Amino acid sequence: MNNTKILNLLIAAIALIGGILFIRVFSVDASVIETDVDKQNSIISPLIYFSYYLFLGTVIITVVLSLLSLLSNKDNLIKALKGIGALTVLLIIAYILSDSNVVYDAAGRVQPGGEEGSSVNRWVGAGIWYSIILGGIAGLFFVWDLVKGLIKP
C-alpha cells in the first residue's frame, strides 16, 4: 500500500469514529444529558476525549514535521532564526516600554495581581506594547504596498 491509501484509511477511520460519537450525543434526549451526570459522562466524555487527543496528536505531528523540515533545509532555518530574533528584539523593546504601575478596578480597589511592581503588570503591558508595535509595522507595510501598487504602471 502506498502512503496516500494509508492516509485515506486513517482519515476515514477518524471520521467514522467522530461521526459515531457525534451521533451518540444526538441520539439521547437533551434534557436527560443536562440532568443525568452519569449519562453525560457516558455520552459526551468520549467525544471530548476523542477530540482532545485528536487535537493533541495533530499539534504534535505538525510541530515535529515543521521542525524536521526546518532542520533539513538550512536556508529556511536561518530565515526562521532571523525572524525569531527580530521578534525577540521587538519583545525586549516592548518590555522596556511597559510599566508596572498599580491597576485599579472601577471601584478604586487594587486588582488582584495588579499591585505596583508586579511582574504580571509588566508582562501585560509588554504584551500590549508588542501588539501596538507589530500592528504599526503591519500598517506601515500595508501603506507601503498600497503606495507601491498606485505607482506601478
Image: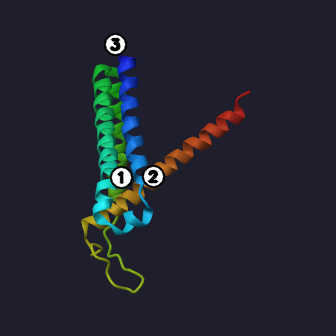
- Kindly indicate whether the residue at mark 2 contacts the one at mark 1 (C-beta within 8 angstroms): yes
Q: Which mark is residue 1?
A: 3
Q: Residue at x 35, y 13 (%)?
A: 2
Numbered disc 1: secondary structure: helix
The residue under label 1 is which amino acid type? Ile
Cα gap from disc 2 to disc 3, whole angstroms:
51 Å
Residue drawn at x 29%, y 65% as measured from the top left: 37
Could you tell me which residue is drawn at 33 percent across and 54 percent down?
Answer: 43
Q: Amino acid at mark 3?
A: Met
Quadrant in which the N terminus appears: top left
Badge 2 amino acid: Ile
x and y percentages locating residue 107 in the rendered image: 40, 86
Along the line of sight, the residue nearer the viewer: 112 or 83 = 112
Image position, residue 116 (x, y; %): 27, 74
Name the residue beneath numbered marker 1.
93
Disc 1 residue crowd, few under 14, some 14–19, many 20+, Cα 10 Å: some
N-terminal of the pair, mark 2 or mark 3, is 3
Left or right? Give the position of 71 relative to 149: left
Residue matched to label 2: 133
Q: Is residue 104 above or below residue 151?
A: below
Query: Gap in Å between the C-alphas at discs 3 and 1?
Result: 54 Å
Q: Give me the disc on residue 139.
A: none
- How much space separates mark 1 and mark 2, taking CA atoms? 9 Å
Q: Is residue 51 left or right of residue 153?
A: left
Secondary structure state at the residue bearing disc 3: loop
Whether residue 86 is situated above or below residue 31 in the rendered picture: above
Which image quarter: residue 40?
bottom left
